[in-house]
Image (tube, rainbow, N blue to C red):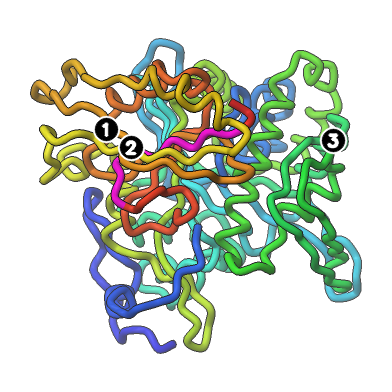
């Protein structure tokens, strides 16, 4: 696809600007959507291996601290010190070269990112937000560079170009970066004795060159390190790369639960060794420790995640074309923390509509679970008095549902969300997802017009 002759002006920090003017042209077309990370909901990890930050105190700074030109890190996450940080977390899949030999994982050079996430931590609000950026997203590289997939930025210009690409594409200042080699996931899973996940549908694919053999039947599986890598790399279904993002999110949630166990601490020396070889960052040891402990204290119910909305474009090169309005809504809510934007024009007096998706095995328990749903609300500390009751508008079965709370509209806010989390039994430990209207979370809606969706699974 041919891009515009001139790059767009650099966006202001409060305005989402698509990296190509062709985004809006493609947005108007009628595409057949194929659907939706990484959810990082661990008490001790962010991204696949940021849990290693807990162990970084024992590592040599020379092994993991790499300066990035022009970066700023004005905030130190000392206990009790309010502050905000935006961190670019990148996962690289360092595999095999053309001769079939494994690439040295310590190199971290010339490889595309398999995963990119923006992580925002707020020590004042005690919240964590994560936005996954699909690897095929169409952007300008850096400022005034060529149009390319966002995952090529790291391969071409390392962390410096990756950071500049994010900043110029989305108008978001990035304070720090973390690069994780996915080989670490394989090693960590093996060190922990495997991780249990639920496979929703058959997954079968084989690639001899990449030494990839995927063959999973539906049901629960105890994945070895190699199996876990295959599960997260699978993209050969109707959802393609977006489906892979979902699976990465589910797996990382399961891995985080395993890492929270006291037994995992007995593997500390082995995990430290793995971390030293598979992480690069410009964060100091102290910052990594503080960040990890902060995430641990926040807990899963205050870790909000989203995937940058868009749709596939198959004209020549396969791109993920970002949808400007829903993407702006995601960035306002999760990264920029701009409530005046994501709550604009929201009618706060009408009932908040809630849809419910539930596993059939919960049918008998459903009335009991929903009877605690609050019917009235109090006051929002940061807004005018709000009196909108909650209203159930849809209930539908979903086989194999995993418990989560999904926010959809501009009307949602932290107070409403916290009331639902506190009143519905077990919802305080569920994943928290933000998926605005027009995004690609089609599987997580009941009738497409609700403010919230409660997804109730057997794990509740």
Task: Indicate the secondary structure of the residue bearing disc 1.
Answer: strand
Q: Pointer 2: what residue?
A: 354
Give the magenta-colored segment's residue range: 449-457
Q: Pointer 1: what residue?
A: 391
Q: Is residue 288 left or right of residue 1?
A: right
Q: Which mark is residue 246?
A: none
Would residue 185 be counted in the magenta stretch?
no
Q: Earlier in the sequence, mark 3 or mark 2?
A: 3
Mark 2 and mark 1: Cα distance apart in space: 6 Å
Image-quadrant location for residue 335: top left
Q: Residue at x 30, y 44 (%)?
A: 450
Q: Residues within 10 Å of mark 1 (few under 14, many from 20)?
A: some
> What percent of the width, then of the height, locates residue 238?
60, 69
Whether label 3 touches label 1, CB < 8 Å = no
Mark 3 and mark 2: Cα distance apart in space: 37 Å
> What percent of the width, then of the height, locates residue 8?
26, 72
Q: Pointer 3: what residue?
A: 194
Whether label 2 touches label 1, CB < 8 Å = yes
Query: Mark 3 or 2, which is nearer the eye?
Result: 2
Query: Mark 3 or 1, which is nearer the eye?
Result: 1
> What percent of the width, then of the height, locates residue 186?
81, 44
Q: Earlier in the sequence, mark 3 or mark 1?
A: 3
In the image, is residue 241 above or below residue 189? below
Q: Is residue 156 left or right of residue 190?
A: left
State the quadrant of the C terminus: top right
> What percent of the width, then of the height, locates residue 247?
64, 50
């Amino acid at each position: 696809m041919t891009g515009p002759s001139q790059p767009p002006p650099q966006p202001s920090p409060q305005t989402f600007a698509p990296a190509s003017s062709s985004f809006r042209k493609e947005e108007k077309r009628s595409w057949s959507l194929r659907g939706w990370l990484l959810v990082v909901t661990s008490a001790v990890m962010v991204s696949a291996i940021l849990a290693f930050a807990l162990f970084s105190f024992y590592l040599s700074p020379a092994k993991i601290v790499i300066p990035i030109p022009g970066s700023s890190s004005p905030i130190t996450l000392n206990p009790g010190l309010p502050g905000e940080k935006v961190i670019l977390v990148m996962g690289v899949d360092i595999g095999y070269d053309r001769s079939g030999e494994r690439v040295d994982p310590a190199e971290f050079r010339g490889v595309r990112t398999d995963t990119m996430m923006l992580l925002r931590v707020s020590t004042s609000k005690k919240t964590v937000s994560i936005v996954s950026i699909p690897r095929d997203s169409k952007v300008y590289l850096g400022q005034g560079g060529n149009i390319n997939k966002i995952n090529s930025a790291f391969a071409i210009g390392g962390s410096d170009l990756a950071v500049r690409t994010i900043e110029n594409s989305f108008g978001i200042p990035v304070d720090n970066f973390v690069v994780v080699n996915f080989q670490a996931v394989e090693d960590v899973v093996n060190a922990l004795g495997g991780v249990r996940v639920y496979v929703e549908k058959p997954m079968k694919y084989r690639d001899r060159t990449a030494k990839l053999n995927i063959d999973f039947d539906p049901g629960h599986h105890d994945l070895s390190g190699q199996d876990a890598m295959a599960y997260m790399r699978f993209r050969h279904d109707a959802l393609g790369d977006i489906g892979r993002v979902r699976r990465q999110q589910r797996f990382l949630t399961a891995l985080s639960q395993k890492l929270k166990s006291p037994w995992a601490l007995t593997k500390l020396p082995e995990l430290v060794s793995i971390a030293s070889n598979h992480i690069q960052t410009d964060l100091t040891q102290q910052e990594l420790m503080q960040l990890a402990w902060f995430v641990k204290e926040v807990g899963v119910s205050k870790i909000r995640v989203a995937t940058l909305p868009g749709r596939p474009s198959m004209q020549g090169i396969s791109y993920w074309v970002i949808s400007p309005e829903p993407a702006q809504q995601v960035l306002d809510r999760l990264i920029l923390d701009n409530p005046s934007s994501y709550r604009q024009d929201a009618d706060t007096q009408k009932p908040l509509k809630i849809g419910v998706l539930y596993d059939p095995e919960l049918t008998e328990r459903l009335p009991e679970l929903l009877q605690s749903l609050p019917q009235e609300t109090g006051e929002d500390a940061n807004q005018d008095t709000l009196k909108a009751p909650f209203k159930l508008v849809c209930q539908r079965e979903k086989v194999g549902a995993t418990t989560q709370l999904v926010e959809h509209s501009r009307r949602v806010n932290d107070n409403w969300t916290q009331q639902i989390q506190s009143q519905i039994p077990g919802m305080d430990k569920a994943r928290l997802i933000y998926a605005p209207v027009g995004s690609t979370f089609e599987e997580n809606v009941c009738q497409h017009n609700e403010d919230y969706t409660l997804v109730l699974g057997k794990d509740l």
